[in-house]
């Protein structure tokens, strides 16, 4: 039994001074001055007590060509725990393999390794033409505890689907209660712009953003929203990165379409000038969508604050500097063009603290912070029956967050398995003092505690239901 005593309990519905009792891995009581003889007392005075955070977008051990994202389920979930995240939802599938193969591989990667609980999304690259067959396929995902799929509108060589396929997925999602996520970038337009840059001899990382401008994202969101509307479905836009994209999300919802969105800390903090550094340094900032401008950062903070953007996730997909240099073809002499640089940034450990800086700066209401990192991802991804809030009976996933703790975001102060940090040199104020996963302390003061590999369980997720508009952060 653990008794978290004397903290300020924060939930999307508000905050209050309360104790939290965790017994047999579950939340047993929340209220003032709980008396629990025999419980281990954790002093939370001066701290915020929040639901364990949920990262709805990670890529652990993702193969990209000849290289693989640096964190596996063990190092990745340890890093997550150190940063206050008690559940991740990772994307199973690396290309056009069958869902069975993808789920089998990801289950094997996670089991025996994960330190905190995890769910799986499925990356889908084809959908049966026959609607009944498509619905059966999606229903079979749900039976296996997978309540969401992602389709890519970009990466023709590996992942992209056409609009007809996306439309079939959306239709099947309505019938089965899956949530369709989209990587919203117009792949054909990216191909055209990439060819143009390469023809001009622009092969370095600094040319990458020009191949994926904000309009490429906005156009794809517009299409996805329309297809969702035609199917009577909702659609969830992963890693929203631009003001133009956010305008499309807002416009779609204003027109009665149902578009949910997620953004990531890199789009709130980093800008494309990072790609102007020396090639080797700049390569560490290659990701898609690319980093953008200050106006985009500002817009995304406002979207997160007003609930137009529901979720703060990470798209955690780090690579080591040497794998970046070698590129996806693992050439001894290194990548030849930006296309070969494996893209993606580390983030699973730093998300809560980076979101909290927005609270400190008055950009993000406290309740929106906790909704976007914990409660909304639980609600949208079928985890509310076990996680995402501090309700009695839910998993004892609790974070004691010290709003005054200082933490430097250098790679050597963090646990993600990469040798560089996009936030190197930055010091944040506010870091988890204690992370509790199903009643076990898995991290203290940003270091792993009883973080035994294999203690994390696969979480079966429930069908998606369009959220109640009365709730904050719809
Ligand atoms: Mn991703």
Image: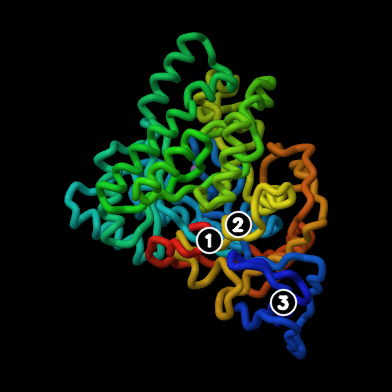
Look at the numbered disc 2 and give the secondary structure of its residue: helix
Asked whether mark 1 and ligand 1 are closer than 8 Å, the reply comes as no
Q: Is residue 364 visible?
A: yes
Left or right: 307 in relation to 349: left
Label 3 vs label 1, nearer the camera? 1
Q: Residue pushed farthest bottom? A: 37
Asked if the residue at tag 2 contacts the one at tag 3, i.e. Cβ–Cβ closer than 8 Å, the answer is no
Residue 439 is marked as none
Asked if the residue at tag 1 contacts the one at tag 2, i.e. Cβ–Cβ closer than 8 Å, the answer is yes
Q: Is residue 104 above or below residue 255?
A: below
Label 1 CA crowd tier, 10 Å (few <14, some 14–19, many 20+): some
Q: Is residue 3 above or below residue 356?
A: below
Residue 368 is marked as 2
Look at the numbered disc 1 and give the secondary structure of its residue: loop
Label 2 CA crowd tier, 10 Å (few <14, some 14–19, many 20+): many
Q: Nearer the viewer, residue 411 or 328?
A: 411
Residue bearing the label numbered 1:
472
Distance of mark 3 from mark 2, alpha carbons?
Answer: 20 Å
Report the residue at 63% width, 56% height from top.
369
Q: Position of residue 311 (x, y in %)?
A: 53, 52
Q: Position of residue 143 (x, y in %)?
A: 34, 66
Q: Position of residue 45 (x, y in %)?
A: 81, 71
Look at the numbered disc 3 and give the secondary structure of its residue: strand
Q: Is residue 159 visible?
A: no
Mark 3 or 1, nearer chain start = 3
Count of numbered badges drawn on the protein: 3
Q: Position of residue 258 (x, y in %)?
A: 37, 51
Q: Is residue 301 above or below residue 328?
A: below
Distance of mark 2 from mark 1, alpha carbons?
Answer: 8 Å
Left or right: 40 in relation to 335: right
Distance of mark 3 from mark 1, alpha carbons?
Answer: 22 Å
Residue 18 is marked as 3
């Amino acid at each position: 039994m653990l008794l978290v005593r004397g903290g300020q309990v924060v939930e999307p519905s508000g905050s209050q001074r309360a104790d939290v009792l965790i017994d047999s891995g579950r939340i047993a009581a929340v209220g003032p001055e709980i008396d629990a003889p025999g419980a281990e007392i954790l002093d939370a005075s001066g701290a915020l007590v929040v639901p364990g955070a949920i990262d709805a977008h990670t890529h652990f051990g993702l193969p990209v060509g000849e290289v693989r994202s640096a964190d596996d389920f063990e190092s990745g979930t340890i890093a997550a725990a150190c940063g206050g995240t008690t559940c991740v939802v990772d994307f199973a599938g690396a290309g056009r393999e069958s869902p069975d193969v993808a789920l089998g591989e990801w289950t094997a990667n996670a089991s025996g390794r994960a330190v905190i609980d995890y769910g799986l999304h499925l990356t889908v690259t084809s959908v049966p033409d026959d609607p009944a067959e498509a619905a059966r396929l999606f229903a079979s995902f749900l039976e296996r505890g997978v309540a969401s799929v992602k389709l890519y509108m970009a990466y023709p060589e590996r992942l992209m689907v056409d609009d007809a396929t996306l439309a079939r997925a959306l239709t099947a999602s309505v019938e089965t209660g899956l949530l369709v996520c989209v990587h919203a970038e117009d792949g054909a337009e990216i191909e055209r712009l990439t060819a143009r840059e390469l023809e001009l001899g622009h092969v370095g990382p600094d040319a990458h953003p020009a191949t994926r401008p904000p309009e490429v994202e906005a156009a794809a969101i517009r299409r996805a929203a329309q297809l969702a509307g035609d199917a009577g479905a909702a659609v969830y836009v992963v890693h929203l990165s631009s003001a133009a994209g956010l305008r499309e999300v807002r416009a779609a919802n204003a027109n009665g379409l149902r578009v949910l969105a997620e953004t990531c800390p890199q789009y709130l903090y980093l800008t494309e000038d990072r790609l102007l550094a020396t090639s080797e340094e700049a390569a560490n900032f290659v990701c898609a969508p690319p980093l953008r401008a200050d106006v985009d950062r500002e817009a995304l903070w406002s979207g997160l604050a007003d609930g137009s953007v529901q979720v703060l996730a990470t798209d955690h997909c780090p690579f080591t500097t040497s794998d970046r240099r070698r590129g996806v073809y693992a050439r001894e002499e290194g990548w030849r063009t930006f296309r070969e640089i494996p893209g993606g940034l580390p983030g699973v450990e730093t998300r809560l603290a980076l979101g909290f800086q927005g609270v400190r700066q008055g950009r993000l209401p406290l309740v929106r912070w906790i909704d976007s990192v914990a409660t909304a991802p639980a609600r949208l991804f079928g985890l509310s029956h076990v996680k995402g809030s501090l309700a009695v009976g839910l998993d004892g996933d609790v974070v004691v967050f010290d709003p005054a703790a200082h933490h430097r975001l250098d790679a050597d102060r963090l646990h993600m398995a990469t040798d560089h940090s996009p936030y190197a040199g930055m010091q944040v104020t506010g870091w988890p003092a204690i992370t509790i996963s199903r009643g076990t302390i898995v991290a203290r003061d940003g270091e792993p505690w009883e973080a035994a590999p294999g203690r994390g369980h696969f979480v079966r997720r429930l069908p998606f239901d369009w959220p109640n508009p009365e709730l904050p952060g719809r």
